[in-house]
Image (cartoon, grey):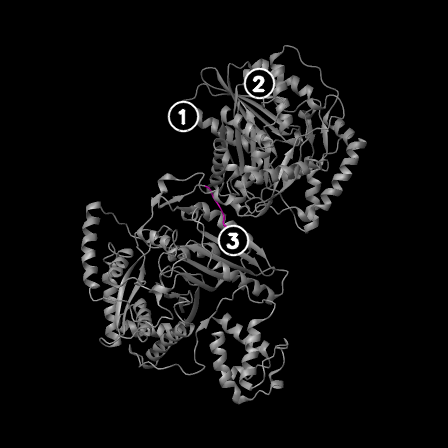
Amino acid sequence: MSELTPMQAACWFGRKDNGQLGNVASHLYTEFDGGNINIDKLNSALVSLYQRHEMLRLKVNHLGDSSIIDIPNHTLLEIDDFTHLSPENLAKALIEKRQNWAHQMLDLTQGQVARFSVSLLPDNAFRLHIDSDMIAIDPDSCRILIEDLAMLYDSEASEVKNNLTFFSWHEMAKIDPILKSQRKSDRAWWKSQLDNIAPSPSLPLSEPNVNKVESQHYSAWLDAEQRTALITLARQNNLTPANLMLGLFARALGKATGDETFRINVPTFWRPPIIEGTESLVGDFVNFVVLSVDMKESKTLLEFCHAVADKMGLLLSHSRYDGVSMMRDLSLHHGSAQLAPVVFTSAIDLPSGELFSRRVHKHFGKMNWTISQGSHVALDSQVVSIDGGIMINWDVRQEALPKEWTSAMFEHFVALTKSVLSTPDLLLVPLDNLQPKLVCLSHLASELTAMQRAYLLGRTTQMPLGGVAMQETLEHRGTLSVSSIRRRLSTMVVKYPCLRTFIDSKALKLHVSQCPQVNLTHVDLRHLEKDKAEEELARFRYTYSHNVFDLDQPLWNVTTFSLSETETYVFSRFDALILDARSIASLLVELFEGLVPYIPSVDFESDHEHVQSTRIKDEKYWLNKLSTVEKSMCFPWHKPLESIPHSRYQRQSLKIDKETVKKLVRIAGKEGLYKNTLMMSAAMEALSSHVCNGQLCVAVPVLPMTSANYASQSSFIVTQWNAYQYDFLQRAKTLQVDTLEGLDHLAFSGVDLARVLFDRCGPAPTLPIVITNGLSWPVLNDDAPMILQRGLTQTPQVAMDIRFVASAGGSIMFSVDYASEAVTDDLVKTILDRIDMIFEHMVETSQYVVQSHKPLPIGRSRVIGLADRDPSENWNIDLTKRKIFDIYCQVIGKEKNNSGSDSLPFSQLGLKPSHLKQISIDLNKELQVDLPVMQLIRCRNADDVKDLALQQVVDF
């Protein structure tokens, strides 16, 4: 009776583990295709092989106790005669056999640790099937077995059995003083490194299904020339070929998961030569080290591979302590089970140069297929020197990993490898510029549309209000875990080409990379107090919301912040070069709820001649429609628009509650007006009251219904409004007719219309005001795990974008995104207040009428404005609290406090009820939050006022 090694014991228990990635035998299945096999000689060779290697006769009982039996209890060589089958049935039989053998669990309790079979094929061909359980035979030992089998097949006489056995060697290794000392030292080293071991990679694992195990094999081939190039390139850069391939694999894995740090299981097969004959033993000598990968520590691919190689050198110098025990230590350290589900195995740097000798190939043919399974292993990547080239194999638990994600990452790894071998200079390219261009899907490449070219121009400052990207930033807060977000993104990146899209600004083309790249960044703020964490979010927001993506990368990003064990804050940003607003909304619903929203579409086919004739017709329509527009709107801009090269953008919002919306829709419906017309007419009316002649000309974004694909497909039409023509109801009806007509003339729209107006009204931006209807966009359910907090949209040459978006609960949010250099905060607030008053009056009168413009009573505003702060400000001071305190001091008549004691009770300042009215007005102006007098009465100090203001924001 012999004791199992830690690795053998782990494999044994993995057979019985019904958890995710368990319930399989750790085994290696291989196929050789050859011709003219002598079955009798092969059977005799197998008998000798079983005599030579006692591990072929290993028996493990249900308790995990091992022993060696004298005579195998099973047939050593199984024969399947397929010579009589038709080609179709033959292929089917071989596939079925492969499937069964690849997923089998050999019966170790009966002493079956290996299985051999020959499939006899037509024309004297054959296939040799070999399956071995890794509890008895590790992959390197399997190679020795096959070499010995070929040797015994080649010889008439049996080889003499070696008296040295694996278990006797193992007992010697346990007591060897040098190895014992090394194990002790390495154990102490690994224990000191537990805090530094990276987490498991964020694989998009499916829900566990103990009743289903499906392993999939992926394979690619590097020919002899590429193998030579790999060896040469590695040597030139002071790397081993194995470490170069490991670095490339780690890079592909990290980009596919979006992890900044993660770990990889790297098996080692070194056998301490403590006694002569060690190298010819068969057993389970395998160990593994855990490599921690850092995706951010290197600037180039060469630096990255060197960093991986340096870490591997250090790990291998401490590899006497077994990996199974180390992972057990790691689990105890974290208080939860820790896995290393991704394995990288290299058999490139073999002493013999090739995996198998010529003799093996002479007798058994070419190894054409192999697959392995391992307990708690989701992906096992292998690179092997064989047949003069290098075979790249991936064995994947496909029931646990999406096939689309796996195959895309595999193609990325192979493409990266071949690209580096053919173009070694890629090793020196900055990493951020490397990934997307490796494999482009030519059938998805396309020319940039006119709108996309306009967005591209808007990134420059050649035009007023430029230097910005047309992009949308959104912020959500909730309970969805970062790991769930990362897993969903990993799947979505493969599923949607738009998330792999980048721009060639020189050729003005849009390209789609085949390489999955998860643009996710994570920041852990759990160690900070709530106020400090909010300050960090605000600091991040200031920069993030106005950053511009590099064009040669997929133009999107998600950044997550862990605020507590259960609270996550998410920033997301998408460039309109790749996605329109409806697509962005749809993607976020899928990301946060795991549901794919329905987007209606209609089939539309048209030939070139029809398109041309329609465009000519639509051009005539718009030239006539816009014939009365002769100059820019007379709007009270803060500065002349043509004088503003660049501006930051801000947002103010107004929420129309569900009940009010219902009443308004009923009023509009009686007049034959749609909900979008209702909202749009209110916005137009509010805007027109600030135009000297009451005449508006605004852009209205539109989306075609001809495709449900996520992409940048938006255009815009132009609508007009004259506050001095007709009454409010008739103006709204005219607006609805004009909008519907405009939608029928989209062949000439967007940039076409802008050019027409530019010729008449330039040089200032000709359509600086946009009204966006988002009522049809998918939205998160009210019970979704993430809740929208705020957002911001920027558009080149647009000074103000008024958008209205519905919520799942029925309310509607009006938001105004505006260039702060062009529009004052007060003006935006006044416009939203006016919209609110229009709706209030309509509800009060139950008629589609508008009252004459008058200012909103003090303290009645419901507008929410959340201004960003410059991060250069002193963040150690609570600026909101200080502003509140200073307002109270000023109104009360006390000198402003500069000592930092802004927590004094207001009663000590001499606060009287008569002061509160003016304080409410001043707070409203400063904080852009409505704080009525009746609420301020209850506030004892600046902290109470700040909490009240924040509560208003949360309610928003």
Task: Indicate which disc, 2 or 1, sits on the residue closer to the N terminus.
Answer: 1
- Secondary structure under the numbered disc 3 in the rendered image: helix
316 or 452: which is nearer to us?
452
Say left or right for 684 vs 136: left
Residue type marked 1? Glu
Residue type marked 2? Val
The residue indicated by pointer 1 is 88
Q: Nearer the viewer, mark 2 or mark 1?
A: 2
Q: Which residues are magenta?
A: 515-520
- Secondary structure under the numbered disc 1 in the rendered image: helix
Q: Compared to 570, does 246 lie above or below?
A: above
Q: In whole angstroms, how far apart are the C-alphas of marks 2 and 1?
A: 29 Å
Tell me if label 2 and label 1 are in contact, CB under 8 Å: no
Residue farthest toward the front in the current orientation of the protein: 643
Badge 3 local density, few (<14 within 10 Å), some, or many (20+)?
many
The residue indicated by pointer 2 is 360
Residue at 56% x, 79% y is 886
The residue indicated by pointer 3 is 485
Q: How many marks?
A: 3
| Residue 848 percent location from the top left of the image | 29, 76
836 or 899: which is nearer to us?
899
Q: Is residue 212 visible?
A: no
Say left or right for 219 vs 565: left
Q: Compared to 316, does 598 lie above or below?
A: below
Q: In whole angstroms, how far apart are the C-alphas of marks 2 and 3?
A: 49 Å
Q: Compared to 622, does 323 lie above or below?
A: above
| Residue 182 percent location from the top left of the image | 77, 36
Q: Compared to 699, does 307 lie above or below?
A: above
- Secondary structure under the numbered disc 2 in the rendered image: helix
Q: In whole angstroms, how far apart are the C-alphas of marks 3 and 1?
A: 45 Å
| Residue 953 percent location from the top left of the image | 50, 71
